[in-house]
Image (tube, rainbow, N blue to C red):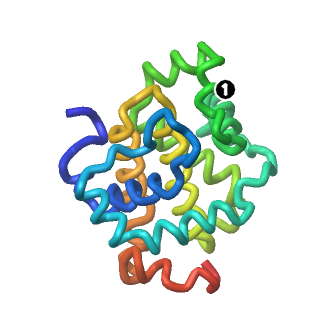
Amino acid sequence: MMEGDSPSITHSDEYRLLETYCQKRKPSTSPRRSLCMYSQEAQTGSEKYGNVAEKLTRIVDSGLLADNGLETDSVNTDVIEKLVELLKKSGDDLNEKIKKDHELVGYLQSTLSYDFFEKLTTAFIKSVVPGFLQSRNKHEEIALTFEVTSRLGALDLHPMNRVMGFGAQYLQKNFTPWVKQHGGWEKAFDDNDEVH
């Protein structure tokens, strides 16, 4: 069993919600491959979490990823900065852009671990949501975690379930306590119009 692929992770609410989100984000015109490998459980999760996934999608699509520069700090390395910028600007050709950079591909194939995923996701969030707003914008931070997981999972470099496992771990570590305080995933995203 690979790192990020334990049964406790793959059966968690976070993992199933990530599956539902990926289903909503997958390109409808791409004949290549589905972003998520769907089982009957994932389809059931889609019904259960569809409303939350839809709200997360709207948050990301609301202009959240406008290019506003990347603040560097000690967490960021050249590779992480490069990936953050690519992920922020990604479109349907993200996979092709990354595959053209052989050094980046080699690095990703050899070093994708939870620690790397965590640094990349944290840098991605910090590049979009200013530090002084992060404690007030949990909805945005959570939506960005879903988006970076979806975009990394779309790359043909690692099994999708591994990346989703990392995303679920990151959510559990950083946001699940907040989600539980707000009544669970559905209630935490009940009214997206209020202050985050």
Q: Position of residue 27 (x, y in %)?
A: 56, 46
Q: Is residue 148 visible to us here?
A: no
Q: Residue 136's image quarter?
A: bottom right
Name which residue lies at 24% across and 58% down: 41
Task: Say if 176 sits above or below 193 in the image.
Answer: above
Task: Say if 84 sits above or below 22 in the image.
Answer: above
Crowd rating for badge 1 (residues with CA inside 10 Å; few <14, some 14–19, many 20+) = few
Name which residue lies at 52% across and 62% down: 142
Callout 1, which amino acid?
Answer: Lys
Q: Is residue 88 left or right of residue 185?
A: right
Q: Is residue 63 left or right of residue 174?
A: right
Task: Say if 159 sits above or below 27 in the image.
Answer: above
Q: Position of residue 146 (x, y in %)?
A: 50, 55
Q: Position of residue 137 (x, y in %)?
A: 62, 70
Q: Is residue 57 left or right of residue 50?
A: right
Relative depth, front residue between 6 and 158? 158
**The N terminus appears in which quarter of the rendering?**
top left
Name the residue beneath numbered marker 1: 97
**The C terminus appears in which quarter of the rendering?**
bottom right
Name which residue lies at 45% across and 36% down: 33
Name which residue lies at 41% across and 78% down: 186
Q: Residue 30's image quarter?
A: top right
Label 1: state its secondary structure. helix
Report the number of discs: 1
Task: Say if 34 sits above or below 1 in the image.
Answer: below
Q: Position of residue 111 (x, y in %)?
A: 44, 24
Residue farthest toward the right in the current orientation of the protein: 68
Q: Is residue 195 visible to us here?
A: yes
Relative depth, front residue between 88 and 50? 50
Q: Residue 36's image quarter?
A: top left
